[in-house]
Image (cartoon, rainbow, N blue to C red):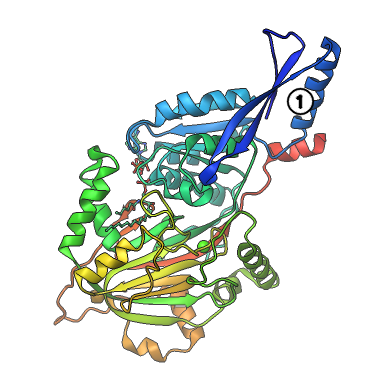
């Protein structure tokens, strides 16, 4: 990692810090000390190692760190100070640290930055998924505003951010960290950041009536998870335990919700939700996905991109559901080490849409239990899973007219694009109970949503370019 001067006991020795892989995707920081016959040779070694390290332009030198002191078990500051800051210091990384004082502090701070972010190589989030989501919003919004992209347009082509986000897990679920890194160990995260690792991610943009609501990078869940999160919000003081309590309560209430889900299946990807492939760094499905998508879209106008980008026919599923989940990534976390959709990909431009129809409590319990072991959670007659590029959910009392089933695909696309789905409420209709969506653990107080997935890759930023030129 870095070469450092060794003072005692051997004046001609120097120590190199390096990364060693350990079990369960963990990384450790180790030291090795070399002894030199004389001071001159020692200086030559230190200089050579330092010069070579300086050539690695993808390694960060300056980071902006946000710490949410109230995330998870309220240990974020302690984790950063004790486990992360000393490693950044050893790696010669300078930091500006902001301890958040309220929700959305980090998002608003990032949105308000103009040229000031240029000095940073990345933003580090010390917190849980809600905090990662907040920082993602700050950066993505900042970038879209700078490029005059209207985020309220569901078909807007998002401009990639120039800064990467590093995640130090200090929240309740830490699913985004666990899914991308394979562990929720703060030291492993810090070492990935230090060596300059990066991973593109799928981002799902969520709209309602041509109004931008949120981006999601882990779980968009309606019904069971929406209800768990709504209930657990009142119990934030309990920390991660709030999810267990709210989970049991929601499970016992066994609520189901009626509605229609329209979706565009991702037919051109190489993977399938039940192919038992696991997405890892350098995944061939993600590489093929982003390559074919770019090639396909290259010659199209912006308007055509939205329509063709979806690539296929709309399908509809109607019914009574205990849960409607869109997993943009596997959503692996310590509670569920393989995740909600174990074969979902990190950056293939798709989400796995999991529909759990109304079933018995026992059936639903067996389905949930399979998230915690190696059994297939989709192997139930009441569960279906589709790999999709976009989808639309209409709760029962806002259902799309049946006549849309006779529409051609292009007419359907046009209606989605112009948001021509108006709630169809009949005076005689009972207003069916509605759930909320949970978006990376935060509540969206909307039932009817449109969602579309796109791959978010960070571009090379100004500082990296400068360093590449220096080489
Ligand atoms: C009978 C045993 C049942 C066990 C069921 C276990 C199923 C667990 C699936 C967990 C999926 C989690 C998806 C991740 C979502 C996170 O983005 C979100 C926010 O995280 P954070 O900000 O770090 O708190 N967390 C959740 O939605 C928690 C869901 C917990 C449900 C029990
Ligand atoms: N200083 C703060 N006080 C209160 N809420 C905050 C603060 N900083 C961030 N938040 C909000 O707390 C929410 C949860 O944070 P997170 O770090 O994800 O913890 P957890 O994993 O426990 O939910 C996020 O939505 C974030 O916007
Ligand atoms: Ca995906």
Residue at image coords 59%, 30%: 29
Number of callouts: 1
Relative to 240, 417 lies left or right: right
Label 1 neighbourhood size at 10 Å, few (<14), some (14-19), many (20+)? some
Q: Which is nearer the eye, 15 or 230?
A: 15
Residue labelled with disc 1? 50
Picture coordinates of residue 139 (x, y %)?
52, 45
For residue 64, above or below residue 415: above
Which image quadrant: the C terminus? top right
Residue at image coords 31%, 84%: 401
Residue at image coords 45%, 44%: 132
Which image quadrant: the N terminus? top right
Picture coordinates of residue 314 (x, y %)?
46, 81
Whether residue 125 is visible here, answered yes or no, is yes
Residue at image coords 35%, 72%: 355
Q: Secondary structure at mark 1?
A: helix
For residue 4, above or below residue 465: above
* Residue at mark 1: C-beta within 8 A of ligand 2: no
Whether residue 121 is visible here, answered yes or no, is no
Q: Which is nearer the eye, 353 or 330?
A: 330
Q: Quadrant of residue 207?
A: bottom left
Picture coordinates of residue 334 (x, y %)?
39, 48
Q: Which is nearer the eye, 10 or 100?
A: 10
Q: Quadrant of residue 467?
A: top right
Relative to 75, 246 lies left or right: left
């Amino acid at each position: 990692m870095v070469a450092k001067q060794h003072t005692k006991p051997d004046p001609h020795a120097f120590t190199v810090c390096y990364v060693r892989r350990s079990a369960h995707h963990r990384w450790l920081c180790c030291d090795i000390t070399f002894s030199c016959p004389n001071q001159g040779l020692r200086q030559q070694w230190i200089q050579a190692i330092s010069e070579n390290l300086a050539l690695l332009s993808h390694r960060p030198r300056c980071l902006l760190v946000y710490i949410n002191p109230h995330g998870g078990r309220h240990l974020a500051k302690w984790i950063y100070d004790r486990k992360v800051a000393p490693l950044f210091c050893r790696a010669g990384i300078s930091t500006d640290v902001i301890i958040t004082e309220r929700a959305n502090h980090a998002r608003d701070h990032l949105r308000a930055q103009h040229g000031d972010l240029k000095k940073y190589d990345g933003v580090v989030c010390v917190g849980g998924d809600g905090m990662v989501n907040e920082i993602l919003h700050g950066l993505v919004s900042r970038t879209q505003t700078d490029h005059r992209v209207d985020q309220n347009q569901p078909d807007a082509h998002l401009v990639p951010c120039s800064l990467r986000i590093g995640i130090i897990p200090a929240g309740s679920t830490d699913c985004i960290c666990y899914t991308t890194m394979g562990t929720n160990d703060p030291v492993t995260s810090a070492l990935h950041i230090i060596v300059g690792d990066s991973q593109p991610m799928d981002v799902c943009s969520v709209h309602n009536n041509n109004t931008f609501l949120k981006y999601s990078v882990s779980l968009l869940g309606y019904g069971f998870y929406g209800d768990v999160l709504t209930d657990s919000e009142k119990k934030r003081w309990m920390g991660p335990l709030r999810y267990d309590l709210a989970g049991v309560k929601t499970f016992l209430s066994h609520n189901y919700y009626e509605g229609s889900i329209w979706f565009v299946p991702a037919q051109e990807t190489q993977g399938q939700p039940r192919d038992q492939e696991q997405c890892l760094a350098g995944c061939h499905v993600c590489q093929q996905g982003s390559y074919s998508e770019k090639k396909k879209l290259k010659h199209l106008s912006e308007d055509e991109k939205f329509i063709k980008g979806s690539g296929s026919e709309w399908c509809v599923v109607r019914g009574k559901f205990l849960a409607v989940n869109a997993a943009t990534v596997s959503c692996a976390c310590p509670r569920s080490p393989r995740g909600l959709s174990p074969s979902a990909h990190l950056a293939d431009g798709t989400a796995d849409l999991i529909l759990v129809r109304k079933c018995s409590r026992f059936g639903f319990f067996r389905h949930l239990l399979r998230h915690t072991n190696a059994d297939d959670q989709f192997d139930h007659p009441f569960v279906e899973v589709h790999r999709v590029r976009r989808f639309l959910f209409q709760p029962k009392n806002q259902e799309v007219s049946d006549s849309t089933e006779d529409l051609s695909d292009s007419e359907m696309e046009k209606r989605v694009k112009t948001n021509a789905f108006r709630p169809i409420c009949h005076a005689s209709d009972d207003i069916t109970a509605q759930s909320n969506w949970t978006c990376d653990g935060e509540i969206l107080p909307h039932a009817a949503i449109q969602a579309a997935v796109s791959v978010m890759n960070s571009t090379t930023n100004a500082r990296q370019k400068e360093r590449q030129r220096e080489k």
